Image (cartoon, rainbow, N blue to C red):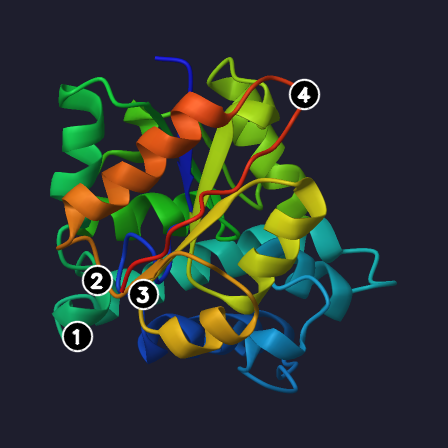
Amino acid sequence: MNMVAIFDNDGTICDTQEVESLCFAKAIERVTGLSLSTLDWTTYEEPTSSAIVRDLLKGDQTAPEKEEDIKREFLRLLEEECPKFPGDFSPVAGAVQFIERLQREAICSVAIATGCFDTTARLKLQCCGIDMDSFPNATSSDTPRRRDIIPLAAARGGFDLSLAVYFGDAPWDVRVSHALGVPMIGIGRRIQQLQSLGVQHVFRDYSASDRIIDVLNHLKSSTRPGSHQTALQAGR
């Protein structure tokens, strides 16, 4: 397999909604006494768990210890909320089957790159029926910047970034894919927003798996090391 599909998690694999953000904010407040200014992640320059926490604790000599405490409390809160809000811990329709098909049919390799902490990403994926450690992966526990997380996930799979295609669901995914020169396939609830940002191929979920694989096969045949190509046809 000469290509790697790199998947974001929240909104792309796991159909994460409001509970995750509320738990994150609550964990920060309980550990630090500080409140986030907003739960609108589009307003943050670097919307990853570690980047938001480190920016909030900038200048605090005990920031590393507090970040670990926040991670633990965040994980505890998610575990507590999971049985109450199972929809927030469920996969996007067809996600698990799609990833399994990529592997079974040797269409391409799979890696995971998420702005979550490692522990919370592992929990959410486990709830969706995916073992994160079965795939090359990188999280914001490795590095706070998404533009570094994605290349790290590719490198851990033994792939040059020029052989990657990125699956994401949010405006920051669009920004980072452009910055890295990596083709992006949009997945999830933000179809219209992604299209308005210039994402050419967007799908609400993975139910049109044949069409998504057509895009991947086009990229697989046209992408070469050192040059990034973009698929020409979109689907919804």
Spatial CA span between label 3 and label 1: 19 Å
**Residue at (57% x, 74% y) in the render:** 41
Spatial CA span between label 3 and label 4: 29 Å
Q: Amino acid at mark 1?
A: Phe
Q: Amino acid at mark 3?
A: Gly
Left or right, 183 with respect to 235, comes to right
Q: Quadrant of residue 109?
A: top left
Q: Nearer the viewer, residue 182 or 126?
A: 182
Spatial CA span between label 1 and label 2: 7 Å
Q: Quadrant of residue 171?
A: bottom right
Q: Nearer the viewer, residue 198 or 114?
A: 198
Q: Point out which mark residue 85 bears.
A: 1
- Mark 3: secondary structure: loop
N-term mark: 3 or 2 = 2
Spatial CA span between label 4 and label 1: 44 Å
Q: Nearer the viewer, residue 81 or 85?
A: 85
Q: Nearer the viewer, mark 4 or mark 2?
A: 4
| Disc 4 target residue | 226
Q: Nearer the viewer, residue 69 or 3?
A: 3
Crowd band around label 1 with a 10 angstrom C-alpha radius: few (<14), some (14–19), many (20+): some
